[in-house]
Amino acid sequence: MTDYDRFYCANAKGMKESELTELLKFSSKPGIISFAGGYPAPDLFPIKEVTEIINELMAKDGKNILQYGPTEGFLPLREELLKFMKKQGADLSIDQLFIITSSQQGLDLVGKLFIGPGDIIMTGKPTYIGAIMAFNCYSARLRGVELEDDGINTVKLEQEIKSLIAGNQKPKFIYVIPDFQNPSGITISMEKRKELIRIAETYDLLIVEDSPYRQLRFEGDPEPPLISLNSEKVISLYTFSKILLPGFRLGWMAGPESLIRKAVIAKQACDICAPPFNQAITAEFMKRGLLDKQVEKIVPAYREKRDFMLTKLAEYMPEMDGLTWTRPKGGLFLWLTLPENMDAVEMFKEAVENKVAYVVGQAFDPEGKKRNTMRLNFSFAGLEQIDEGVKRLAQVIKNR
Amino acid sequence: MTDYDRFYCANAKGMKESELTELLKFSSKPGIISFAGGYPAPDLFPIKEVTEIINELMAKDGKNILQYGPTEGFLPLREELLKFMKKQGADLSIDQLFIITSSQQGLDLVGKLFIGPGDIIMTGKPTYIGAIMAFNCYSARLRGVELEDDGINTVKLEQEIKSLIAGNQKPKFIYVIPDFQNPSGITISMEKRKELIRIAETYDLLIVEDSPYRQLRFEGDPEPPLISLNSEKVISLYTFSKILLPGFRLGWMAGPESLIRKAVIAKQACDICAPPFNQAITAEFMKRGLLDKQVEKIVPAYREKRDFMLTKLAEYMPEMDGLTWTRPKGGLFLWLTLPENMDAVEMFKEAVENKVAYVVGQAFDPEGKKRNTMRLNFSFAGLEQIDEGVKRLAQVIKNR
């Protein structure tokens, strides 16, 4: 095969097959119990309601919803989302919010707008692999700051930022997943949210807040979204993938008006508009009050799965110094840390042979180093599978 | 409002509101007959068939089609498209083709893979505004080469390429729309297709072939797609927007296997996957043989509209030296040239006041200069509207 390296631009030279993709291929082999993907439970998809809505919309408005739409998105959907965001504590105007083709597109747009080659982005450590991929496409240099039980270590974050600025390497933005972080499941405390805003204000930095799991809270009261604490320094990304269904590829971005205007321009060059058909269905779904009901249906189901996985981890996992896992208050994932001398990457083959899969934590390390961690998803598998899967995983760990 | 310029990367500083967007806003005002957009005729959307398919798929496979899917796209859709491409003369393997979220995304991906700041891209002059926008996001420098009645002037193209290479500024690729070009309606002849391939081979250049209108041929025999003439140097972009419907935002990209692999990696960081739901519907639509039937339905309808617009142009337009228009053999657009001293940009306001809209040709000029041209779309308006719209436009031109 001809080698095309000579044609790629500098940014493209660094784009490599993600470990996640490769591993996800294994995890879909027959008989494997997968804790790997970030898939919502398909049993909970509102198939009946969505089908009904489609039939009504097609009969009434088919010509319109199958046509091109504005880059900003379908107006009734944006209006529904303003109400939705208001309930989250963020009071936005229509020009502060637009529809994106998945929140992953939001990460790409943020890269497109802000990241020049070598620019530094502050992230948690670990952080979402999709953000690492998106920012790497723009040749970002990621600086990960350790997470604590209540979120990113803001003291270290500030120190790092200070010293970067002193070295004339001011970061372009701080990227955080405030609620039930992917991959760790950790939520940022109110105190640290305020600290993040103070840091952004002090050093004139933007914050990109990625919030796919916010609505999936199993216990306790929600902390305010960062955008509600400062409307000039925060860009927020949301998705329908975890609260409704992923197959529509829809999300939304909110932020300061002139920034959103610029993001819309960038989006137009990416795909003109998010699928109008899917947007119209989703708007109607929200208009009927079905999204809130859907969340009410998902939350207890995922809470049960989380509780069950935690019980099974306590039951099956060997007692080992350094073997720990998080206890997330919501979302889809928990994070398991092995003893320092164990290697979750090497162990992966053995796990797959024993018919259980996870995502190696290394994929979420902005520096790609840490090898003794793994992400476990509890939303996709059924209870029986969770029982059996955790048992198999514990056996693999014992065998090392 | 705070000014965010200090945060944008160098590439983003050049991203500006497109003229097209602004003008399209005018053209959707009530009472205006619009020849502006590139909208297909909504009366021809296969609403009934699509609705039937959705009902069947949701009952049978809802959980699967509403879930995430592979970045490469839904396998049955890719398989259908292989057959489709084979009928076009391009015999591809499955790894040479993947699904994109609109062919506009293909343009973005091509930019992402190949264009570094200041890189030169060869295009026709005029050329598709969406490509100009997409490539500009990567700070490309576009070099437009004049179109002739049988496509891009390949003699000039070769001269330009030679002199660029001599100056150590080798272009990154040649971008062409071979069939019923947007905006001009011009189709590249067989002779020039061979010339393009020879040039690509001689100077080791890639060709990006953008082919949204290929299936919409009203007369004569199709020329082979460039990808069928050389499978190592050509990347092809296709869309369902013009032959099925735009509201699903689906297209496909074909090219050499290792390049496609790289494009898939880049796409994963952009939006993970094209909407699986929409892909499943489209695959089923193709499987039932409905896409061919749909094209058979569209072609005579658009042929009639083209013929009608040409008749009305001949009937209403004043006789003026330098006032000419193309006679496309397919597609959605024709291209009208005013006398050199007339300005279609200035005239636009008057046109809108007289309740008719077009797109100013300047938007399609890679150098953004030429002001005496306009693109007229004939697919969207009905026959009565075409009659009245051309009459109004002729009046505006007479009044200058």
Image (cartoon, coloured by chain):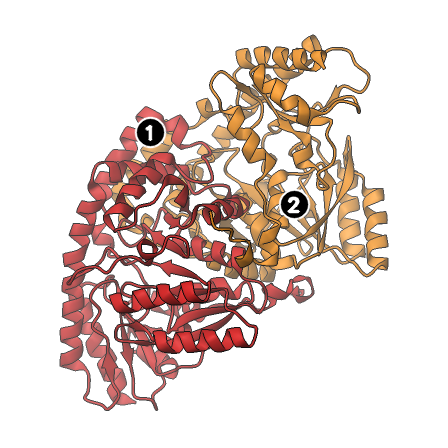
Chain colours: A orange, B red
Note whether B376 is above or below B92 in the view shown. below
Q: Position of residue A77 (x, y in %)?
A: 45, 47
Q: Marks 2 and 1: same chain?
A: no
Instruction: Indicate the position of residue A148 as horizontal and vertical percent values.
Output: 79, 33
Q: Which residue is mark 2?
A: A209
Residue name at image x 42 percent, y 66 percent: B202
The residue drawn where x is 52% and y is 66% is B136
Q: How many marks?
A: 2
Residue at x-position 29% and y-position 39%: B80
In the rendered structure, which amino acid carries the disc numbered 2?
Glu
Q: Which quadrant would residue B148 be assigned to in this image?
A: bottom left
Say which amino acid is labelled 1: Met
Whether B362 is drawn above or below A338: the answer is below
The 10 Å Cα crowd at callout 1, few under 14, some 14 to 19, many 20 or more, is some
Q: Chain of mark 2?
A: A
Residue sitting nearer the eye, A314 or B81: B81
* A16 vs B342, nearest the viewer: A16
Q: Is B19 on the left-hand or right-hand side of B192?
A: right
| Subunit that carries the residue with mark 1 | B
Helix, strand or loop status at disc 1: helix
Q: Which mark identifies residue B58?
A: 1
Callout 2 secondary element = strand
- Specify whether A298 is left or right of A148: left
Could you tell me residue B191's position as x and y percent? Answer: 26, 68
Seen from this angle, which residue lies furthest top? Answer: A315
Residue B189 in view (yes/no)? no
Res. B76 image quadrant:
top left
